Image (cartoon, helix red, strand yellow):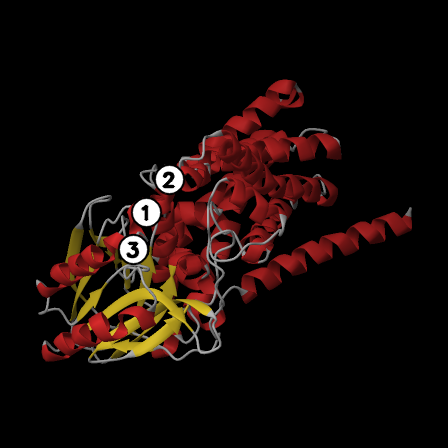
Amino acid sequence: MIKLFKSIWGDVLVFIAGVLLTLSFAPFDIYLLAFVALVTFKLSLSSDLSAKRAVLRGFLFGFGLFGSGVSWVFVSMVVGEQIGLFIPLLMTLFYCSFWAVFPAIFAYLFIKLRTDNYFDCLIFSCAWVFVEYIRGEWILGGFPWLQIGYSQLDSYLAGYIAIFGVYGVGLIATMIAALAAESLWRKNTHRKSIMGVISLLAIGAILQSIVWTDVSGDPIKVTLIQGNIAQKDKWQLENRNTTLKQYYDDSVNHWESDIIIWPETAIPAYYSDVKDSYLIPLEAEAIAHNTTIITSLPYKGEAGQLYNTVLALGNSQGLYHKIHLLPFGEYLPWQPISGYLLGLMNIRLGNFSSGDINQPLLKAAGHQFVTSICYEDAFGEQSIRSIGQASFLVNVTNDAWFGRSIEPYQHMQIARMRALESGRYLLRATNTGVTAIVSEKGKIIHQAPIMQRASVTADIKPMSGLTPYARAGDKPVIAFILMVLFGVLLNKYYLIMRK
């Protein structure tokens, strides 16, 4: 085994391991492959590697992961556009290569911090999640896709989620993989490593039986509308009235519901353009039927700012302006290069403003709820802001950009994590899928078929109380990781000074 990983075959294996890691996420959901991939990666870094070779292997692992796992970005650049394939292929290659740099950074960090003893397992897991955190929260506003914790939603490790969140579960998963690799690499630690793995899995299984939140009222009947409007047709002015009529027709069959939810930008027009002709009559009907419609549309502020907005109509009224904007979708970083390249592809994107971080919660059926738009549901700490006042979560999304790729399923998996972290039901309405109702345990209990015009109706339970994660967020896990890494750095410095 040592000779294998020291040879060029080690480079090949680590690339394959990155591809296998993609299969641990939705829609494949083979969560055990996350451990196979990480064990292989750890073993590839356990040989006597130079920092340069470690960085190469980290990049190869990352390119295998992101090249297979987020190549759907190519679909988003060509859907509905007649722009050829060369530039989208080039930009997809660059995009995947950019994110592949982060496993390379991890590999360099691990090689420099390693101690060549059993403590390497903790260093491996802390360094991995530290780099995931930087990628997921800071770079380009955060890109938390394909983080290890999401692959474990249906494993025994899911018991840790309500306590530690996605980063805490990622820390435990990578620790298990590191222990497994240690048992293969160092035979003298075999028994200790196996016991560590069994203990972590057993604790996770026990934690799954704990109920952290409570039912706080009568069931609420909800309906989610999935319009399935093709992205290339969505914003065509001649299609606007047809789209508005479709959502109205799909809703009148569900006036008995307490809440009806439409997806992101279900209304393809500014609020001011449809307020009098469409929204006011729609609200009057909703009030007459004792229901609340939650919809989404672009909104122009008094000073000309553009917002991606959720609007509550009917028994309760209110606006929520999206806070966490999507790079390359709602604003353009890396200007002027990104604008030039997107201009070549004839892709015109919005120039939106962020909403106030302290916006009041919206309300429906007598309960307040936390609202998120599109990929805002990928940020755990945003979802638990004011969660103590909220009875459930609402997410509206338009993943039509990604067609029948694996992205809508990955996004749904990410959204499920927010339900489990907060101990709240999640109501997720999308344009083309995946539209679903998720329980407070993170399980999908009702789901619409993807890429079809459909609706989902069910009763949910309003919840109260706070999970440990909802109380503390990511701070304890990140503080622990920083403490470990800083302690290792100090020890390294001390040993150098002693020489």
Q: Are marks 3 and 2 in contact (CB under 8 Å)?
A: no
Give left or right: position of 219 versus 499.
left
Q: Earlier in the sequence, mark 2 or mark 1?
A: 2
Instruction: Name which quarter of the figure residue 224 lies in.
Output: bottom left
The 10 Å Cα crowd at callout 2, few under 14, some 14 to 19, many 20 or more, is some
Q: Earlier in the sequence, mark 3 or mark 2?
A: 2
Q: Position of residue 384 (x, y in %)?
A: 42, 69
Q: Is residue 293 visible?
A: yes
Q: Amino acid at mark 3?
A: Leu
The kind of secondary structure element at disc 3 is helix
Q: Position of residue 487 (x, y in %)?
A: 72, 57
Give left or right: position of 442 versus 334.
left
Image height check: is 50 above or below 199? above
Q: Earlier in the sequence, mark 3 or mark 1?
A: 1
Q: Which residue is mark 3?
A: 237
**Residue drawn at the location 17% of the way across and 75% of the way down:** 281
Checking the image for residue 443, the label placed there is none
Q: Which residue is mark 1?
A: 231
Q: Are marks 2 and 1 in contact (CB under 8 Å)?
A: yes
Q: Nearer the viewer, mark 3 or mark 2?
A: 3
Image height check: is 369 above or below 178? below
Q: Position of residue 114 (x, y in %)?
A: 70, 42
